[in-house]
Amino acid sequence: MLPISPPIEAIQDRKGLDSEVARLHRQDNNVAFGFGATPDFKNSSQMIAMAHQGGLGMPDRDYYLRDDEKSKQLREGYLQHIAKMFELSGDAPDKAAAEASTVMALETSLAKASRTRVELRDPEKNYNKMTLAELKKLTPDWSWEGYMQAVGSPSVGEINIGQPDFFKELDHQLAATPLADWKVYLRWHVIHNAAPALSEAFVQENFNFYGKQLSGTTELQPRWKRCAQSTNQDLGEGAW
């Protein structure tokens, strides 16, 4: 059983929600959106802050929106997977199923506002540097200053907002979606992010969907190999 993350359970208001999004970002949890430093597309000698679309449990928007039979089957498999993970975390089956539907509804709203893979390849379209004053107009219900302070980012004058329409919708969802639904969504992503390092039941269920159904992989790699890959990914490239 995986207990509810205490900070998530403790969220009582919008300020608490915003703080928890920042805390989870510090732990590399893909919730709501992505944020980091990247070379300036138009000046590679300079690093700039960038915010981009994210927050989905499946690879991209098409998995949520395509109408072909395979996509429908994957969505149903994803719903069942989320519910099963909530059950493994200690929730009753009926509650877990309802929570899975909540996660799917919120992620689908974000997916609808997300750009396609093709659109994401267009550097001009995804280059939208904005001042903090301009960002305030784009996302009036989200404090970028407070967020950057919470994630430990240095003070910046501009941020490249990769997909402005996505952040308009995210800002709307942060204000309009019930706090209880956001807490379910955040809890799901904590479970999902931790799954490969949890007990065998979590590891196997995670592989059943992401390995077998989503990727077509037939066999889970041995534990030693998964540990070595995880370590290699965390270490990154060596500096010379």
Image: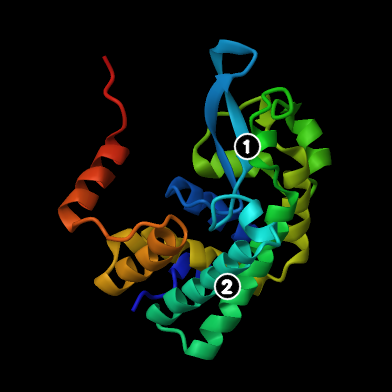
Q: Nearer the viewer, mark 2 or mark 1?
A: 2
Would residue 176 be found to the left or right of residue 233 on screen?
Answer: right
Please tell me in which quadrant of the rendered image residue 73 appears. bottom right
Residue tagged 2 = 76
Please tell me in which quadrant of the rendered image residue 107 appears. bottom right
Q: Which x, y percent locates residue 170?
A: 72, 52
User: What secondary structure is found at the residue carrying circle 2?
Assistant: helix
> Where's the C terminus, which quadrant?
top left
Query: Of residues 233 and 31, which is closer to you in this image?
Result: 233
User: What secondary structure is found at the residue carrying circle 1?
Assistant: strand
| Total numbered circles | 2
Mark 2 crowdedness (10 Å alpha carbons): few <14, some 14-19, many ≥20:
few
Residue tagged 1 = 51
> Where's the N terminus, which quadrant?
bottom left
Please tell me in which quadrant of the rendered image residue 195 appears. bottom left
> Which amino acid lies under the numbered mark 2 shown in the image of this protein?
Glu
Q: Residue at image x 76%, y 60%?
A: 175
Q: Residue at image x 31%, y 39%?
A: 233
Q: Residue at image x 20%, y 45%?
A: 228
